[in-house]
Structure formats: C-alpha cells, structure tokens
Image (tube, rainbow, N blue to C red):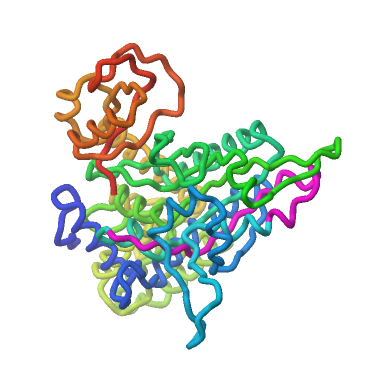
C-alpha cells in the first residue's frame, strides 16, 4: 500500500501535517489563522472522545451545563492573577453593530469568570454542596506561536469541569477523583501520560496549585493534554461564593477545575499513527470495522447478501461498522481505510462464503487471519481488547525509554525526552537548566520522595526532582 510522503521517524512535524490533511480531519484554509474547520471524520472522532468524557462525568455525578460565550469585562477583572495570566490572550468585543458597548465583552479564554458569578447565586447552604458541573465548549485564546492543527490553535474545543466544596479537604478529594478519571479516559485512548505538579511560576492563573497531564510524542517532545487545578478559596472570595454551614455561619467555598482540549486528537494522531496514516483506538474510532466485499463476476449477489448480514450482526452489538460498496478496486479501498485508521477490516469473498469463514485484518499490525463466521462477534471483541492493549504498550515503551532521571547537567544534555534533575526549589536554577537544555519546565512528580542529590546548578540540597522537556 502507498505510504506518506514524509516519514514519521524522519520528519515528524511534516508527517503530522500530511496525515491531518490526507485523513480529512480538519481544513486549515479558513481565513482566520488557527481557527480551523472540522471535517466530518475529524468531528466524529472528537465527538467519540467527548462521549468518553461525558460517560466519566455522569458516573462521578457531574452535571452538564452550557454557559454563554461572552464575558463582561467587570466579571473577568475580579480575580487579579487571572486577568494578569490571560489578559494578553483574550479577544475583546467593543461594538454591537455601529454602537459602542458601554462595557467591553470578551470571548471566553476559559470559563471561571463566566461561571462563578452564577455559582454565587446558586449556592446558599451547605446542602447545595458539592456542586459538580462541566461543559464542552469552544474557548478562544490569541495564540502568537506557529499554529498546528489540534495542538496549537486559537479556537479550542475544550472540556472543563468546575466544582465547589465545603473546605480544602473535600476539594482535595475531588482532585483525587479527577486523577482517577484521567487515568480511565486515557487508558481507553491507549495514551500513557504523566502527572506533574507545575512550578509556582507556571501554574494556572489564580490557582493554589496545578497538575498537568503530559504525553510524550515520538518526536521526543511532550504535549500537555489537560490540567487539574486546586483553587482553595482564591476565586470564591472575589466572586462571593459562600455557603451557610449547619451552625449558621457563612464560609467561602473551595473550588477545583479539570480541563482537557482537542490536543487529545493531536496525541492520538502523533502517538499511534504510522506511515500509512491514522491508527485509531477502537474505543473512539468513528468506524470500528469496515467490510470490504471481494466481488467476482457472477458472484456479486451472495457476497453482497453475506456482507449485509454481517453488518446487521455487528450493528446489533453496537459496533460502528460500514460496508464499502464503491466500484473501485479492493486495493484502493484498503488504502483509504488504512489512512483513516479503521481498527479492523473484514474481507468477504465467494471462497470465504463457501467455507463459512471471514478474513479479518488488524490495522495496527497488518496481520490477517481467517475466523469462522460463528465466532465472529467473540473474535472481534477480543481483537478490540488486544488492539487497545498493544497500542498502549507500544506508547508506554516510548515514554519508558525516553524518561531519564540523572544528577548532572552533562548527563542531561546527552539525552532527549523527559529529563528529571534534582532541584533545590529556586526558580532561577530551573530557568538556567531550561536555557541549557533548550527546553521547558514540566513540573515535579506528584509522588513525594526523598532526594539525596544536590541541585546541579547551585549545589544546595534538593527538595524534589524537576522535569524538563522540549514541548509543543
């Protein structure tokens, strides 16, 4: 089968751009840079990821909401750190037609400042807590760096969960639940990732602390898929989000957020894809199985009837399946569906019908095997599980082989991927290491551990390890 012009291991960035275009995921030709048009296949793939997210939200008693896109300037400016962190990235609306607005509005860069004035109205008593909400919307940030489909854009397809709790301890329980949700979602996507606690200078604007979710791409760069934020009462105070406790005293809520973006698609493309195109985890593939009738003259009817019968069986099992009946060669069909990453291909020809068997082909390995028609459903479900596991294991190998803990700068400069170095806790030392490695600070491991080695910059005792990597 034909392969991509650019090779994944030779020029990852150009390979990535080529795959996005060939697989019809999005169209970057919209006249505003960084605001791309979702093509049907890409949108269906994103919708499957959203479905996974909604499933997890429903299982953990979150309720879906949908807040307005526009935020008044007065609401946005209530939290000083937040306005400082996002002020340079927002898009402002100043006129309604020819009429200048009395107060400027902005397109949401994220939704704290849209939601929290309403939370202050919804929450009155301790019985109103916890409040657990989420929405899946578009957010807007003026990205000044080079844009890249799904990875760095100006209009972002965004999931955000916002919760309110009685106290810090209850909010910490929510953080624990968020980490468990992330583990479950990304396991289904076959994407191993790491949690890192962001340093003070790189946490979310207004947060008490931030935990990032980072995946390692085959290029050796990391991609942040999402983040979890503990706010304490930093937003509750300016937005007057209070509740009355059982003793009649008013207290400020403690809040958390958990966000993920369309970067998840960037990770799926980059981590799993190959030189033939996409390789999609069965859980989110828009089409999980494609049936290719192998037609011979005079044998059209039994092949088409058998293909339809198999389709109906799979649909009854809630499997997303299509028959490709186009009058083009089987080879051209194979090429197109491999490009789109369909996990399993079924080939049905006259000889298969005679022997009551079906040819099954896995997209990730290309391995073909014959199975008895009576065993089809059982075998397909087994193959789905094996594909998911094999994709996860392959991606885990990348992160295991390219995550290094060393003690000296000399050792660090010889490696690529994620580098862990002892750290004294001073920002200046981390910044110097960033400059030497020409990378970025990811954060420290969330698991506490004793560090005996000294900081490689200042020589002082280390408090923890700090992670560094080149990032997207």
When asked about the image quadrant of residue 294, the answer is: bottom left
Q: Which residue is most to the front? A: 102
- Residue 154: x and y in percent read 37, 64
Using residue 279 as the reference point, say whether residue 124 is left or right of it.
right
Magenta residues span 119-144
Q: Is residue 394 magenta?
A: no
- Residue drawn at point x = 65 percent, y = 58 percent: 117
User: In the image, is residue 419 above or below residue 17?
Assistant: above
- Residue drawn at point x = 41 percent, y = 56 percent: 357
Q: Nearer the viewer, residue 344 or 200?
A: 200
Q: Nearer the viewer, residue 291 or 94?
A: 94
Taking the image as drawn, is residue 450 in sight? yes
Using residue 12 as the reference point, say whether residue 165 is left or right of it.
right
User: In the image, is residue 458 above or below residue 322?
Assistant: above
- Residue drawn at point x = 32 percent, y = 69 percent: 24
Using residue 178 as the reference point, say whether residue 93 is left or right of it.
left
- Residue 333: x and y in percent read 29, 69
């Amino acid at each position: 089968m034909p392969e991509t012009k650019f090779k994944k291991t030779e020029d990852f960035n150009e390979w990535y751009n080529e795959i996005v275009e060939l697989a019809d995921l999005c169209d970057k030709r919209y006249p505003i840079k960084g605001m791309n048009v979702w093509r049907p296949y890409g949108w269906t793939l994103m919708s499957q990821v959203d479905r996974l997210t909604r499933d997890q939200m429903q299982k953990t008693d979150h309720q879906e909401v949908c807040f307005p896109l526009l935020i008044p300037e007065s609401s946005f400016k209530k939290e000083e750190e937040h306005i400082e962190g996002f002020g340079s990235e927002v898009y402002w609306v100043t006129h309604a037609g020819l009429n200048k607005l009395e107060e400027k509005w902005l397109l949401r860069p994220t939704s704290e400042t849209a939601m929290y004035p309403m939370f202050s109205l919804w929450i009155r008593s301790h019985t109103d807590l916890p409040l657990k909400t989420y929405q899946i919307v578009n957010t807007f940030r003026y990205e000044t760096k080079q844009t890249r489909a799904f990875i760095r854009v100006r209009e972002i397809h965004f999931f955000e969960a916002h919760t309110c709790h009685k106290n810090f301890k209850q909010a910490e329980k929510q953080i624990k639940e968020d980490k468990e949700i992330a583990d479950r979602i990304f396991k289904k996507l076959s994407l191993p990732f790491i949690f890192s606690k962001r340093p003070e200078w790189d946490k979310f604007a207004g947060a008490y602390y931030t935990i990032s979710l980072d995946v390692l791409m085959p290029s050796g760069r990391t991609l942040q898929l999402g983040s979890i934020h503990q706010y304490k009462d930093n937003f509750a105070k300016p937005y007057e989000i209070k509740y009355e406790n059982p003793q009649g005293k008013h207290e400020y809520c403690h809040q958390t957020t958990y966000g993920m973006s369309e970067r998840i698609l960037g990770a799926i493309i980059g981590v799993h894809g190959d030189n033939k195109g996409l390789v999609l985890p069965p859980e989110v593939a828009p089409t999980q199985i494609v049936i290719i009738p192998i037609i011979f003259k005079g044998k059209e009817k039994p092949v088409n009837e058998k293909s339809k019968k198999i389709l109906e069986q799979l649909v009854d099992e809630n499997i997303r399946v299509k028959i490709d009946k186009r009058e083009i060669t089987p080879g051209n069909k194979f090429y197109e569906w491999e490009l789109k990453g369909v996990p399993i291909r079924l080939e049905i020809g006259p000889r298969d019908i005679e022997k009551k068997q079906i040819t099954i082909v896995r997209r990730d390995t290309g391995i073909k095997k014959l199975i008895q028609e009576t065993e089809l459903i059982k075998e397909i479900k087994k193959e789905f599980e094996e594909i998911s596991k094999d994709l996860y294991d392959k991606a885990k190998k990348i992160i295991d082989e390219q995550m290094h803990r060393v003690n000296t700068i000399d050792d660090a400069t010889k490696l690529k991927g994620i580098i862990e170095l002892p750290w004294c806790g001073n920002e200046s030392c981390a910044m110097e290491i960033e400059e030497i490695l020409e990378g970025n600070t990811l954060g420290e491991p969330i698991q506490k551990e004793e560090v005996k080695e000294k900081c490689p910059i200042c020589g002082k005792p280390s408090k923890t390890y700090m992670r560094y990597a080149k990032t997207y």
